[in-house]
Amino acid sequence: MAKIASKQKVTSKERLSRLLQSSGNLYAEQMLLQSSTINDLEWGAFGEFYEKKYKEEFDRETFYSKVENLSLGKDGKINVAGNLLFGKKPQRLCPDFYITAIWFHGNELAGARYNSSENIGGDLARMFKDAQRFVISCLRKLQNGKDFNSLGDLEVPEIVINELLINALIHRDYFIQDSIKLFVFDNRIEIKSPGRLPNSLTTEQIKTGVSRRRNHILASYALDVLPYRGAGSGVLRALQAWPQIEFQNLPEVEQFNVVIWRPRHDV
């Protein structure tokens, strides 16, 4: 795969790519993976998606043309979006597009102790499910007045975890070759996404439901492979369920952070 970006610094090539992306002339998700072939897509998963979305039987003989018609590949190769949605082994072609998940002991990023860590890979649906599982396994269950034998309620509503993980996977900047960071501390959960907010979008705007798509293909088809509704409503739903969320747009380091504060539990 052609190198899309550097982890260490923003190159002039990357700046040009972002300029073209903001003008609507270039999108990272559409970039063809030169070492790929159409057979790097899982045709079974693609067929299931196709039949669900278009309500017609999937014909494997027209697999190649359907992939191209849906902007998931071209000239016998697949693009970044096709790989992330339906790739057999997505990280073989895009090795830096995964989730680094760490459950820290305490509240400091520099702390030497952690409870568990995991590199979460696979397609978007698999990454979402495994990241959700990771976070939930780190959180407490509260009885909230329920019977002692009940399972209790998650200390942070599950919808908050779902919406913000999906938001990171779909809207991160895929020009930057780096992983999403999912950090769980004693007092907070952090989701760090490569790339600033797109097209002069601000944190105050996203909190009111304003959205501007960076990855149009992923956002369009995510409706069929993830519990995603689009239209900028995910952040609103998360805030309505749990207002203790901070959004940090950091253009100087090309990063967007979400901080979900956990409820305080006195020992």
Image (cartoon, rainbow, N blue to C red):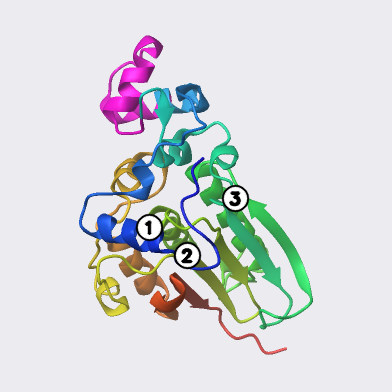
Residue 60, compared with residue 267, is above or below; it is above
- Nearest to the observer: residue 59 or residue 28: 28
Q: Residue at x 31, y 69 (%)?
A: 236
Q: Position of residue 247 (x, y in %)?
A: 40, 77
Identify the residue under disc 1. 171
Which structural element holds mark 1? helix
Q: Residue at x 33, y 15 (%)?
A: 57
Q: Position of residue 43 (x, y in %)?
A: 46, 22
Label 1 packing within 10 angstroms: few (<14), some (14-19), many (20+): many
Disc 3 marks a residue whose amino acid type is Asp
Say the numbered circle drawn on residue 130.
3
Q: Residue furthest front?
A: 12
- Examine the residues drawn in magenta and state their main secondary structure: helix
Which residues lie in the magenta part?
48-73
Which structural element holds mark 3? helix
Q: Quadrant of residue 208?
A: bottom left
Residue 265 seen in this snapshot: yes
> Which of the two labelled residues, at mark 1 and mark 2, occupies the earlier sequence position?
1
Alpha carbon separation for disc pair 1 and 2: 9 Å
> Which of the two labelled residues, at mark 1 and mark 3, occupies the earlier sequence position?
3
Identify the residue under disc 2. 193
Disc 1 marks a residue whose amino acid type is His
Disc 2 marks a residue whose amino acid type is Ser
- 53 inside magenta stretch: yes
Q: Quadrant of residue 145?
A: bottom right
